[in-house]
Image (cartoon, grey):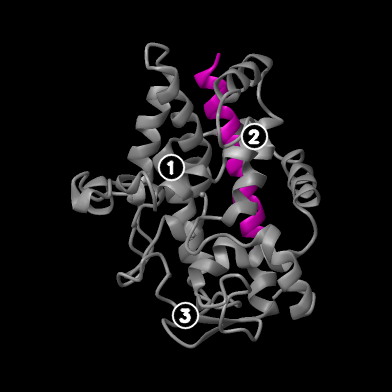
Amino acid sequence: MRARRLQLVAVAALAVAFHPSTVFAWGDAGHRIVATIAARRLTPHAKAAVRQLLKKDATGQTLPAVATWADVVRRTTRKETYNWHFVDIPVDHGQHTYDEARDCHPPDEATKGDCVINALTREVAKLNDKSVPIATRRQALKFVTHFVGDLHQPLHCAERDHDRGANNVTVTFFGQTHQPAPYQKSLWNLHATWDFGLIMHAGGSQAAYVKRLQSWIATQNASSLESGSYADWANESHAASAAHSYKLADGTMDFPATGGTITQPYYDANINVVDQQLAKAGVRLAKVLNEAFP
């Protein structure tokens, strides 16, 4: 699952639609794109089950409408879920694969929870268990919708020298040091670039973005896209972070810890990675929900 070809005025105008709260994976737009793709791939039975669970939900009655709920509660009523949105697989000395003992925080660490892989496993289990109270299953559905997205944001599955998934790596984003209004007090960083900056720079509406990703999905083998465990998906995202997020545009050198710049070459080198991760997240979320509601 925390500046475009247009001029700055256009960026500010589109910020309301595409800008998330800081450090939220994919941002609001990305999570809704993932949820929209998933919703269109649900079986009739899964669609009915989702509709039934969400029909009285105060946040919204569709997957896209509830896709960002988990980001809101992690900072308000559910602070113990803070660590559930990422997994710190290190890239300090080359690419690694997920190691639960190393990468998943102890559940009692400052009451902030463990990591996205374990959290997703628990919430899917609640969703699958019809003996669980409906209110709990409703929340589980909202968590699952969000966490599958988080798991596909490369910098939510990586860290380098304890940089908090590149949140500490400040950048200049297409000439701007600060993020667009209403978050102009926040500096641009590499994590935010992948959360929403590259999506924002692509331009266009969310509907057009979904249409483009669905066209790509149609060219792929669905079974291949759906395959793998949650840990496999995290490793895939981590590999993308090592090969792309933490590299300069030409892929030959590591992105600097300070003083880096995001310009058109970096966007051109990485937007396809962003798109494919969003698309795979949507396909895989649908798979998880179809299996939960057979």
Is 75 situated left or right of 173 in this image?
left
Q: Is 281 covered by the magenta stretch? A: yes
Q: Is residue 13 above or below residue 273?
A: below
Q: Is residue 77 above or below residue 38?
A: below
**What type is the residue that disc 3 sits on?**
Thr
**What type is the residue that disc 2 sits on?**
Ala
Q: Residue at x 33, y 47 (%)?
A: 115
Q: Residue at x 36, y 46 (%)?
A: 84
For mark 2, what is the residue? 38
**What type is the residue that disc 1 sits on?**
Asp
Q: Reading the chain from its start, which is encountered first: label 3 or label 1?
A: 3
Is 237 situated left or right of 123 in this image?
right
Dominant secondary-structure state across the stretch colored magenta: helix
For mark 3, what is the residue? 170
Quadrant showing the C terminus: top right
Task: Give how far apart the Cα atoms at labels 2 and 1 are.
Answer: 19 Å
- Kindly indicate whether the residue at mark 1 contacts the one at mark 2 (C-beta within 8 angstroms): no
Q: Secondary structure at mark 2?
A: helix
Is 148 situated left or right of 95 in this image?
right
Q: Is 148 covered by the magenta stretch? A: no
Point out the frontmost of discs 2 and 1.
Answer: 2
Q: Position of residue 109 (x, y in %)?
A: 19, 51
Residue 85 appears in the figure: yes
Q: Secondary structure at mark 3?
A: loop
Which residue is the extreme one toward the top? 131
Residue 204, by quadrant, is bottom right
For mark 1, what is the residue? 232
